[in-house]
Image (cartoon, grey):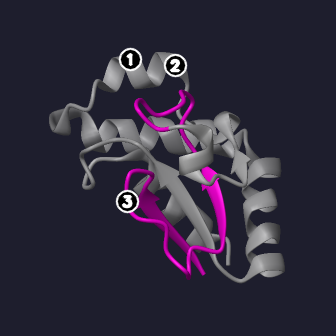
């Protein structure tokens, strides 16, 4: 099972393999405390897209469309996440953003679930 979680949340026994999916390292959290197994920056939205979006809910729909287009270029990393799910059972995709309704993690999760 693949799930998403803010990196600032408590480490869970069922987190399984933990993948940070942000391009930038989260503020205020040490690498030890983060307990990240893999930092997959390449799967995050491009810097240009992230700056354009600026976490503006009014741009959410278009952001999702643009990010999905970027993800089509990351097929190898999408397959890598699916392979890690097969290997570890549970995979948790970690992100730092405060807005849990308008996060790239949701777009990525939907994309990965379509590939099952």
Q: Which mark is residue 51?
A: 1
Q: Decide: marks 1, 3 in contact (CB < 8 A)? A: no
Q: Nearer the viewer, residue 75 or 101?
A: 101
Q: Report helix, strand or loop for mark 3.
A: loop
- Kindly report which numbered mark, 2 or 3, lies closer to the viewer in this rendering: 3
Residue that numbered label 3 is attached to: 9
Residue 91 locus on image (x, y percent): 64, 70
Q: Is residue 97 above or below residue 82?
A: above
Tell me if residue 2 is in the magenta stretch: yes
Give me the residue at 45% from left, 23% from top. 49
C-alpha span from label 1 to label 2: 6 Å
Local SS, label 2: helix
What is the secondary structure assignment of the residue under circle 1?
helix
Q: Nearer the viewer, residue 11 or 76?
A: 11
The vertical placement of 105 against 2, above or below, is: above
The CA span between labels 1 and 3 is 25 Å
Please give the name of the residue rendered at 49% of the width and 74% of the height, measured from the top-left corner.
Answer: 12
Label 1: few (<14), some (14–19) or many (≥20) C-alpha neighbours in 10 Å = few
Highlighted range, magenta: 1-29
The quarter of the picture where the N terminus appears is bottom right
* Residue 114 position by quadrant: bottom right
Measured as percent of width and height from the top left, residue 83 is found at 82, 69
The 10 Å Cα crowd at callout 2, few under 14, some 14 to 19, many 20 or more, is: few
Q: CA–CA distance between discs 2 and 3?
A: 25 Å
Spot occupied by residue 70 in the image (x, y as percentages of width and height): 60, 36
Q: In the rendered view of the protein, which quadrant contains the C terminus?
A: bottom right
Q: In screen coordinates, is 57 left or right of 46? A: left
The quarter holding residue 18 reads bottom right
Assess whether residue 86 is covered by the magenta stretch: no
Identify the mark at residue 47; answer none if there is no mark: 2
Give the vertical position of 58 relative to 110 (above or below): above
The earlier-in-sequence mark between 1 and 3 is 3
């Amino acid at each position: 099972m693949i799930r998403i979680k803010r990196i600032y949340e408590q480490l869970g026994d069922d987190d399984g393999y933990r993948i940070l999916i942000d391009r930038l390292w989260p503020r205020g959290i040490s690498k030890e405390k983060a307990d990240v197994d893999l930092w997959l920056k390449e799967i995050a939205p491009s810097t240009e897209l992230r700056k354009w979006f600026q976490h503006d809910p009014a741009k959410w729909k278009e952001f999702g469309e643009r990010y999905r287009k970027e993800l089509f270029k990351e097929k190898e990393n999408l397959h890598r996440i699916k392979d890690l799910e097969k290997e570890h059972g549970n995979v948790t995709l970690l992100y730092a953003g405060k807005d849990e309704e308008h996060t790239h993690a949701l777009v990525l999760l939907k994309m990965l679930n379509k590939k099952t």
